[in-house]
Image (tube, grey):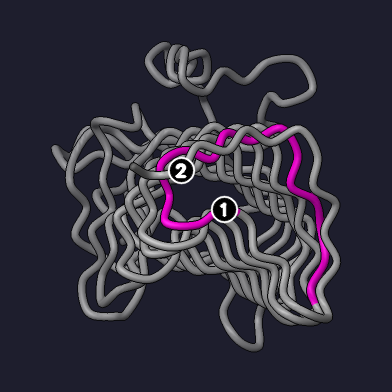
Amino acid sequence: MRLKRGQAVVVVTALAAWWLYLPGGAMSGGDAPSGRVVVVAQDGSGAYAEIQAAIDNALPGDTILVKQGNYREDVVVHSKDRLRLVGESRDQVTILGLKRVGAFRIGKWPYGANDIEVRDLTVSQNGGLAVGIFNGTKIRLVNIRVQGLLYVQQAKDVRIERSLLGGSETTGVSFSDAQGEVIGNEIRDNDYGVTVAGMSDVRIEGNIITNNLYDAVVFQSGSKGAVVGNRLLKNGGAISVQEGAQADLNGNTIASAP
């Protein structure tokens, strides 16, 4: 869907400006967007009715603001730079997926995505995968809810923070040959909490990892990282560092399941 002649995109309306300072995802100072502000709304009040259409037409520096609703579509961000996707709130915007495995993807072989921020929305799994990050750099997920697996492969400088990650029949967050940080999240109700595989290097800090069926954190052979200051509560196991892996473990609180 393309804009009709005369539709405003560049001008930040009063409503859009208010969204930039929502409590769940405030932007200020150096974080303020440098490009256009584009609104997605299913009721027709925005420039687009679908998230993917807004992404496809986005320019570097744009911010896409998504109004409340359940968006049953496959969302893919690839070949994009300096893009923000901001929901009206985590409890009011849900991406459900449609046909593909994985409702939301950042990066797509052989194309990547760079300097992408996604915040204040929910992604529900489709076909077992909720969010997939592939071949990207400087990816930020902030204050989102992921219902299902969050999978990161061959991506660098990935930061997942202040989010609720759970409900996966496999792993809450899985890194494979990737580099990143998992900071200040709640990771719960999965088979495993966080798994780090391949040549990954991942810092896991300040999270609550709870009620997972097996280990809270697993470093597989060849991987490395740090597990610092987390609360590991009522999981089937604690931290597993397999032979050939390296992990700095410091200041974690562990309480086993009864």
Q: Which residue is mark 1?
A: 238
Give the numbered dot on residue 256.
Answer: 2
The answer, for residue 9, to whether it is visible in the render is no
Against 110, residue 37 (above or below) is above
Q: Residues within 10 Å of mark 2 (few under 14, many from 20)?
A: few
Image coordinates for residue 257, horizontal then vertical, percent: 38, 44
Identify which residue is drawn at 52% across, 23% down: 25
Image coordinates for residue 114, horizontal then vertical, percent: 72, 60
Left or right side of 204 for 167: left
Image coordinates for residue 110, horizontal then vertical, percent: 65, 88
Q: Residues within 10 Å of mark 1 (few under 14, many from 20)?
A: many
Image coordinates for residue 186, horizontal then vertical, percent: 47, 37
Does the stretch in magenta take in 218? no
SS at circle 1 = strand
* Count of numbered circles on the image: 2
- Counting residues from the start of the chain, the first of labels 2 and 1 encountered is 1
Callout 2 touching callout 1 (CB < 8 Å): yes
Against 57, residue 40 (above or below) is above
Q: Amino acid at mark 1?
A: Ala
Left or right side of 87 for 25: right
Left or right side of 114 for 74: left
Does the stretch in magenta take in 228? yes
In terms of secondary structure, what is the magenta stretch mainly? strand
> Which residue of the protein is positioned furthest toward the left in this rendering?
43
Q: Which residues are magenta?
A: 223-238
